Image: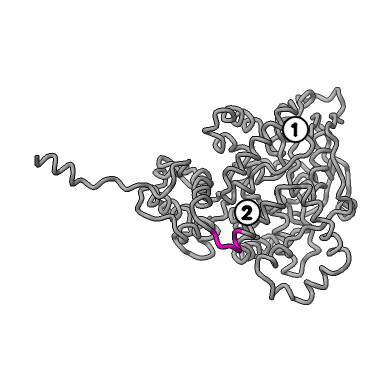
Amino acid sequence: MAHLTQITDHPAPKQSSFDAHHPPSKDLLSDCVHCGFCLPVCPTYVLWGEEMDSPRGRIYMMAKASQGEAPLDAQFGRHMDNCLGCMACMTACPSGVQYDKLIEDTRFQVERNLPRSSSDSIFRKLLFATFPHPRRLRALAIPMLIYQRSGLQRLVRATGILKFSPKRFAAMESLLPTVPKNLRRRLPRVTPATAPSNAATKAHGTRVGMLTGCVQQVFFQHVNEATLRVLAAEGYEVVIPQQQSCCGALMVHCGAEEDARSLARKTIAMFEAANVDYIVINAAGCGSTMKEYGHLLREDAVWSERAKIFSSRCRDISEVLLSHPPQQPRNPLALRVAYQDACHLRHAQGIHAEPRSLLHGIPQLDIAEISEPNLCCGSAGVYNLLHPEPANELGDRKVENLLAAKAQALVSANPGCLLQLQSGLRRRGLAEVPTFHMIELIDASIRGLSPQEFLEHRAQS
């Protein structure tokens, strides 16, 4: 009887605060030894010095919630929302903690189980209703074009009236991309290789699909055009499936799991139908998400294996171009540029040396490294819209480091980073400093453009 009493009196294990659908893995949580190597590279910890706004602090909160010792309340949600998801902690971590999977699964939990304020919910729905939809973005671009070309934007910014508007609205205005002159530019569905057929390249016969993105295909089509020209010049046949939409990266960053899974399935099916060997991506945030489709769809009986195969074929443009020796000569481009690592390329995908190797292959191009290279610029998907104040602090800090390099232009590999840098430059009164995607420099070098021709060509895009 005493034995039975002892068993009966033993406290029952507490129930997890997470729901049963894909809670953060306890095995992955246990990988963290709380050593603190992540602290100096975490943007929010660098800004605030708050333990719960560091990766190990968030993992501690996840573990407590998993054990039923901490609730999923507003405080928990706030610290998870504060994370930029830059994954710099993964590069710094000596234990190999898979923080990307932990924060994404936790954000899905937060979005399902914690109600948001009406204003926050409406703002997020507005973002989801526009950003992932190129057609809607093109429609929105028309009043934006009038706003910019009429001089109204200059007037609004000169008066300082935006200081008195809601912070998120002011952030959206400050990040508006320059609307291209021709919004109807479309890329051909199939572009054959333009490299000589007798060129000694294994790229010939390789058929690649190219992601055009959602925001990118509307406001950064010049980057897609440069990517297409370079791939064709290097011997690749390029297929561009038409009517592309969001890959789901935005939804993953914001915790909208079912929407992310739906867009992932659509993207997989689209490129499967294109019958390509690889999928080439020139936007770091998209690439990191697409390479993790296998995890996102891990329990989907129909799509799990297809997602793994698809992700194994995804390549950043820098990976593709380095897979074979260059087929076209690189002409000199006498510029000094400062290179900014996109976090989802450097940390989430582990691609660091590849872009530098490609840029160093351009004669007379001087590539400057910057201070605090692992610190995020503050873009982080739509973080700079949802959390404009810390994003601006980080953006100003990044611009300060870039300007210290005394470069003529700033270079990155992600459209969000480019917009964030442009916004930071404008706050410094330096809107004339040009920003470029890495692939634009390679394209200019292959085409033999002088720095002046390159800058003029870009201005006319």
Res. 209 mark = 1
Residue 60: x, y in percent? 40, 53
Say if residue 412 shows up in the picture. Answer: no
Q: Position of residue 320 (x, y in %)?
A: 71, 34
Q: Residues within 10 Å of mark 1 (few under 14, many from 20)?
A: many
Look at the image and give the residue range highlighted in magenta.
116-121
Residue closest to the eye, 228 or 126? 126
Q: The N terminus lies in which quarter of the figure?
A: top left
Whether 291 is among the magenta residues is no
**Residue named by callout 2:** 380
Picture residue at 75% right of the left edge, 40% below the top: 244
* Left or right of 448, for residue 122: left
Indicate left or right for 365 with 417 as reference: right
User: Magenta-highlighted stretch: main secondary structure?
Assistant: helix
Mark 1: which amino acid? Gly
Q: Marks 2 and 1: CB-CB under 8 Å?
A: no
Q: Is 117 one of the magenta-colored residues?
A: yes
Image location (x, y in percent) of residue 309: 62, 28
